[in-house]
Amino acid sequence: MFGLNQKDGQLILIIAILVFLAPFLLNPFPVESELAQFNAGYPDLMQRFIIFGIFAIGFNILFGLTGYLSFGHAAFLGVGSYSAVWMFKLLSMNIIPAVILAVLVSGVFALVIGYISLRRSGIYFSILTLAFAQMSFALAYSVLTPITGGETGLQLALDDPRILGQQITEQGNIPVPSLFGLEMRDSMDVVIGPWLFTFNVGYYVCAIIMMISFYIAVRIFRSPFGMMLRAIKSNQQRVNYTGLYSRPYMLAAFVVSGMYAGLAGGLMAAMDPLAGAERMFWTASGEVVLMTILGGAGTLIGPVLGAGMIKYMENIISKINETILHEWFRWMPDGIEDLVVTLIYPFIGKGWHLTLGIIFMVVVIFLPGGLVEGGQRIMRLFRRRSKSRNTTNSSDTFDSAS
Amino acid sequence: MDAIILQIMNGLDKGSAYALIALGLTLIFGTLGVVNFAHGALFMIGAFCAVTISRILALSHQIIDESKTDFLGNPLKVDVPYVYEWFGSNVGDAIIDWAVPISIVFTIPVMIFLGVIMERGLIKYFYKRPHADQILVTFGLAIVLQEIIKYFFGANPIPTPAPSAFVGSFDFGALVGFDTNQIIYPYWRLVYFLFSAIVIAAVFAFLQFTTFGMVVRAGMADRETVGLLGINIDRKFTIMFGLAAAVAGLAGVMYTPINSPNYHMGMDFLVLSFVVVVVGGMGSLPGAVLAGFLLGVLQSFASMAVIIDLIPGINQVIIYLVAIIILLTRPRGLMGQKGVMED
């Protein structure tokens, strides 16, 4: 299917099904139940899953394939957001030109930064990308205020030209981003028994774009170009000695990955038409690194998993507070209940960063391949068990298998 | 001329902080070959050591003072710090006043202990792993440390004043023969600069003139051979990690009066310190110190009104700009040596 082998085809199909059924899958608990706060099926969060998924897929093309750790990827996200919002201001509220411009501008930006940064490798490359991102952040925050809106961020206004589209709605409001009339924030609520499912236009637009970009990522992974990048990761010197000039490949990977980040930034602006400099801050770059590592760098599905997990934790864990904890542990004796709540309290609510940091450290220490490797290990464990059960008579095969 | 001297002096205190943190980073990198992203967190923990010590020293309990009465005629309750009772009110006052310098004494063992635990408990397992893994695990550790501090001390900056003897500014210009009121410089910044100069000198002297330092330098040059000579180089390097942590901690302690510590100050400094290390040359101790002061001074020059008028926004980006230029023209940094981090 589409030039993919059977396994990749299945993977894409499974992901497509999961993504399109996400409003159901992420809302497993009835609205009235106590567990409803674990529901993640509201449009805002689902859009963020997808958008950061795209961001992480793009980052993975650079880090996962070539091993070059960029600490300044958020700069491209920010540039994408800014250019999309400018498109909304100047042209129309249709998201197509906005997203296209976001991808193009961040691609050019990545070309310039990549051309300079890729002269160095290893930690020097990380520092150079970090320096460029911090520079863009500082400039967007101060001098470039006419273009970026400075501290308040770039927002739409009533008197923006919007030459191709509508300048003001009939009610006298700023129009909302749309796709040929389909407004991004439109959603449809479906009530089935005690459950409530929300289907949001913006989410499905993002989902379709993510499936396309995921497909492109799979093709890149399987292409000769992807093989070349892997070769650079395993031994760049040897690649050079073989007579291959590796820098154009690196640059191409960097630009592609920057364009993915720009796409994510553009979509972010399409869902909520404003852009701020804090999207370029280096903690934002750190976040995408966390996502990719947590899910599994260099794997296809890992970054998406990592992005989903971090965004889920950010939204759900930070919502839990002390009263909810007391609610949960009410069945315990009073003294023990208080003790348990005090023990857990630092890790929830505002302390969710602590949980994130600990999970991240545990993953880097014990599971360098991320969640995907964890899943594979568990699978292997099961397979080995069932295999050893089949061959209990010959104990020597069991030894060699373990 | 006086404006130039003023900018140089303004740059020195920030430069000293950069230099101290970069020195610690380079020590760790040069000895253990580990890129430590948690070093900024150590700086921050040092600052919070000062906060803790000054809180402990100011611990007080209430007693009923019969000599004073409130407006109803009841005896007044007054807070009396414990140190007043133990040492008398004069010495007690002085101790509370000098809490920041006193906390140096406590910070050094705490930081060395922390550094050794960190190295033995975590970093040790990452020598064989790629640099990216080291960056990532220490990055995670930095998040954890910073959140722990946030949990105990809250998210707001905690003002920690300098001893009252050093509060205020003095007229440096008048001392060296310029017009009065041209170069005004706060006392504590001068103290900070002198202090960091002493610490830097002490670290270099320790490496240069002691047997321990000699072994460490030999280990930096060729770890394997030193190990073959029957020296337990791992233990020496562990101690060096503790020492580097202590240097970062000291930088943090003394920085508290200049900038009230908050939980993310470490990260803010870390990014710049990494740039400093790379500009100075990875693994070169004098390079780190030189680049630290150089970038500090450059940054303060770029903040001059004249220069901002000329090139707007230059004060925000000067450090990164210099770093980019240096990395592209002198790839090994100002004083980097061949063969360090070339892969």
Image: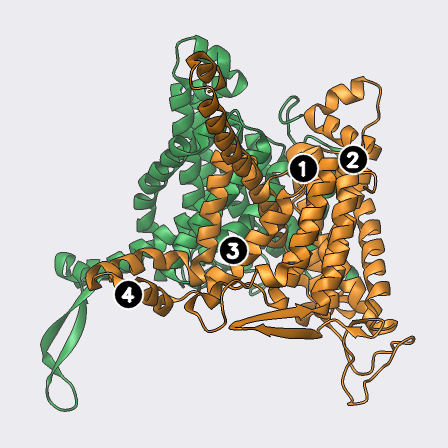
Chain colours: A orange, B green
| Three-letter residue code for mark 1 | Gly
Q: Chain of mark 4?
A: A
Q: Secondary structure at mark 2?
A: helix
Left or right of A90? Residue B60 is left
Disc 1/disc 3 C-alpha distance (Å): 60 Å
Q: Are marks 2 and 1 on the same chain?
A: yes
Comparing labels 4 and 1, the label whose residue is closer to the camera: 4
Residue A289 horizontal/vertical position (percent): 61, 45
Q: Which residue is mark 4?
A: A330
Sequence-first disc among 2 and 4: 2
Give the mark nearest the N terminus, 4 or 1. 1
Which subunit holds the residue at mark 1?
Answer: A
| Residue receiving disc 3 | B175
Q: How far, Cα to Cα, is label 3 from label 4?
A: 71 Å
Q: Are marks 2 and 4 on the same chain?
A: yes
Q: Residue furthest right?
A: A164
Q: Amino acid at mark 3?
A: Leu
